[in-house]
């Protein structure tokens, strides 16, 4: 099947891990992920009333562990500044990157296309705080790719 790209916008909140945890909860509860057990392409877990009712139940299945969910559920934590990116992690775009790549400290939705290449490997994600027209943080953009 190969990896799938995914992206999400969530309301801004200063703790990126709390934002990630809330997004993961929402994606799981709505079934907006690929479930490896029925192995049906083009369908989400929401299409199956017998899908797992807890994340522990979902991840207990070896098929899911190997194939992932092709969603934010495959990401577990936000990296700290200077921490090396790894499997299942989200690395925030830092101010220095924003300045280097886009010449600005405050990213907006208009910058999303330009920053997407920063998530350049599978089973890895990025996030960026996006700002409104007045320069205030307004949302967080999560993107990356995962799954096999």
Image (tube, helix red, strand yellow):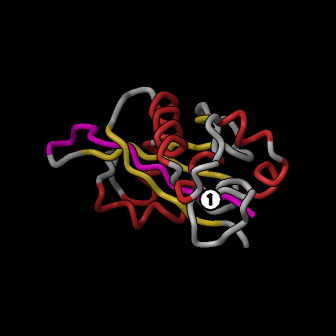
Q: Nearer the viewer, residue 121 or 47?
A: 47
In the displayed structure image, the side of residue 111 where residue 4 appears, left or right: right
Residue located at (53% from left, 40% from top): 24
Camera-nearest residue between 28 and 136: 28
Which residue sits at x=61%, y=37%? Answer: 53
Magenta segment includes 80: no
In the structure shown, which secondary structural element does the residue marked by tag 1 occupy? Answer: loop
> Where does residue 19 sit, x and y in percent of width and height?
45, 33
Residue displayed at 32% across by 43% down: 139
Where does residue 41 sit, x and y in percent of width and height?
64, 72
- Locate residue 46, reporting x and y percent: 53, 54
Decide: few, some or many residues near mark 1? Use Cα within 10 Å; few <14, some 14-19, many ≥20: many
Asked whether 21 or 96 is in front, the reply is: 21
Q: Quadrant of residue 78?
A: top right
Q: Is residue 132 left or right of residue 27?
A: left
Q: At 46% across and 33% down in the image, what residue appears?
A: 22
* Rendered location of residue 82, percent (x, y): 64, 35
In the image, taking residue 139 as reference, residue 33 lies left or right, namely: right
| Highlighted range, magenta | 134-148
Q: Which residue is mark 1?
A: 34
Total marks drawn?
1
Is residue 138 covered in magenta? Answer: yes
């Amino acid at each position: 099947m190969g990896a799938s790209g995914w992206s999400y916008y969530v309301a801004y909140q200063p703790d990126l891990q709390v934002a990630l945890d809330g997004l993961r909860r929402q994606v799981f509860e709505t079934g907006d992920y690929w479930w490896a057990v029925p192995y049906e392409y083009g369908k989400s877990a929401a299409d199956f009333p017998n899908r797992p009712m807890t994340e522990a139940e979902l991840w207990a299945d070896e098929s899911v562990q190997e194939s992932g969910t092709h969603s934010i559920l495959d990401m577990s934590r936000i990296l700290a500044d200077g921490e090396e990116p790894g499997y299942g992690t989200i690395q925030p775009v830092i101010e220095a990157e924003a300045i280097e790549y886009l010449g600005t400290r405050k990213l907006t939705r208009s910058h999303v296309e330009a920053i997407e290449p920063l998530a350049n490997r599978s089973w890895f994600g990025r996030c960026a705080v996006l700002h409104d027209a007045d320069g205030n943080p307004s949302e967080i953009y999560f993107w990356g790719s995962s799954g096999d």
